[in-house]
Amino acid sequence: MSADSSRSSPVVRAGFFAGILVLSVIVGTVAIGGGAQSAPDVSQVNAPSFNSGESVATPADESGELSMSADASGKVVVIDVAHAGDIDREALTPLVSTLTENGATVRYHVGERQSGSPLNESLRSADALVVLGAEQRYTKSELNGLSAFSDAGGRVLLLNEPSQASPAGLGLFGPIRSDSVTKPMAPLASQYGLSYGNGYLYNMHEYDTNYQNVYATPTGETELTEGVDRAVFYAAIPVQGGDTALTTTEQTTLSKTRRQDTYGVVARSGNVATVGDTSVFTQEFLYRADNEQLVGNLLDFLVTGEKSPADAPRPPESGNSGPGGSLPGAGTGSGGVLPSEPDATPAPDPNETVMSDE
Amino acid sequence: MNNPIDRRVATALQSYTVLAVIAILIGAAVVPYAASVAEGDEQYVAVVNIDETISSSSSQDTVQQLRELRSNESVEAVVLRISSPGGSAASSESMYLAVKRLAAEKPVYTSVDQYAASGAYYTAVPSDRIYVTPASLVGHVGVIGTAPSDGLSPAATTGPDKAHRGMTRDQYYASLESMKRAFVGAVMTERGDRLNVSRETVAEASAYQGGRAVQTGYADEVGGLEAAIAGAADAAGLSEYQVVYHNPADPQGLFLLAGGSEAGGNATVVAEGAPYTFQGVDTVHFLMIYGTPENQQVVYNSTAQGGA
């Protein structure tokens, strides 16, 4: 102890005391580890799946033009809306306008319920028929008429959909409250050795923007697949039988069985072709992948049939009260092309036995 | 001052050494006391209840609570008690990020009660461990929404996308896919090696219950809230702790009507409530919610009116 320190003023000593006290408190606090936490690195709380280059999907690419290579002059294509559910006719615009531009006449068959003509009469003046997912059943006479129509060379295009596949406004139909195949299509298709699976197709591995948009590739070189490398189908239904023209890519799953396979989605059986989807004809899907090529080929298919006799299916013999649609070659058909008449007010054929369509 | 002891003390107090020693002793005595006053003497495991449909406001409340727990020194671990079907997509993403942030600093365990489905599973997935009971339902990783129409708008608009919710159908589907990728990617990242199913299987949006959820790797263990609390405390190295319960969010009162069912009844699901929306205004709702309502229609009031 120096004399200096003993003589130092109480104020200095008090200051010194306070200083040491503060210092020791600070040292103790740091040692115990109180106070504010340090923030983690930003990278620690970064969600990699939010920021990877793969995380943002881009809208589907749409390009190409719908065109036909066949001359459709003078051909009459009938679209059956009598048996279908709630078809959005506007969605068929690309199909109708392309056929019309190439010289074909497009008519809607509305059926007797809407004071139209019976189906067989509509077919008599037609070269091709398009059926879009029927919901009303076809009568025996209509089935016979269709059979005679295609046997004579009339072309038939059957488009089917799994029910409840279309959210409102996406496909051609409003929602239907079941998830099975639209049953009336089955007897129609089975006449031609075609059938449909049950459920819709999806692919979790390779798809166009959404798992329900499956890709399909041609099975070989056919008229229907000319210029098509890959097509996109929305919630398609598998088609079996006939000659399969397009099958879905690997690992496509059928919703009902959850089995992965390559499923047929477009098939042809003579004068009849079927597609397990209606969406390819809508503007939303028409220009994706090579859909416009596929649809163009289907339109060519519709107008390249040569119908003989031209008025098949013929009306039944007079006095015959059986179902209409006799076999080609039997009976006395007029043989000539009937003048085309408007759908709305048909002149009923006197020999036609009108079947009540229930 | 004639007492010799007094004189010695007076002399000693004039010594800097003695002063320093006394100051340090006092400081050393004060610090732990001060620290314990600041912290409270206890160590806590906080249980946060998430039992509502995830909406913008509920997620805001929960995220705020999680942040408080993160910065609270006495909270050593957090247990999320989840019983929610999910909800709004964007709000579920916020919840995911908040839980992820918390889990970066403290053990976070999840106990699933009825379900942690869709957006609620999104919330749970960053936690260190997920406990389920045999009937708990987890997973359902995906997004649903109503696609915009693309028709002519009856309203007067200044541009084509001012109608139909600001996006074309193609853009809408791309958005849906982007959200799905982020969601599925988050599950793949967070569950990592514990997941026994492929990315494609996760994207199928299956929901799994109890033991099956453990088998697939969506959850870690069958056990209740007690097990989760004990596990979280153990992970934080606590031998003695208190449990404190928080219930940050109130249930919302907005409904998503699922109309037109065969049964004729309307199933109602509580859905996202924006701060200002009008009934009849057509907006895109991306939901991460359990179940797939048909013919969805979002109705903005607190009581279901029936009829979609």
Image (cartoon, coloured by chain):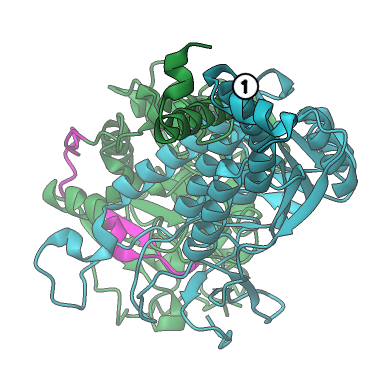
Chain colours: A green, B cyan
Q: Is residue A314 above or below residue A293?
A: below
| Image coords of residue B254 (percent x, y) | 53, 76
Q: Is residue A346 above or below residue B182?
A: below
Residue lying farthest to the left in this orientation: B158
Indicate the quadrant where residue B151 lies: bottom left
Residue A215 visible in this rendered orientation of the protein: no
Q: Nearer the viewer, residue A258 or B179?
A: B179
| Image coords of residue B69 (percent x, y) | 61, 47
Residue A88 visible in this rendered orientation of the protein: yes
Residue B120 magenta-drawn?
no
What segment is highlighted magenta in the picture? Answer: A63-92
Task: Quadrant for the N terminus of chain B, please.
Answer: top right
Q: Secondary structure at mark 1?
A: helix
| Image coords of residue B21 (percent x, y) | 62, 22
Residue A90 magenta-drawn?
yes
Q: Label 1 belongs to which residue?
A: B21
| Image coords of residue B43 (percent x, y) | 76, 42
Judged left or right of residue A13, residue B138 is right
Q: Give the residue type that dot 1 points to.
A: Val
Residue visible at 27% across and 22% down in the picture: A227
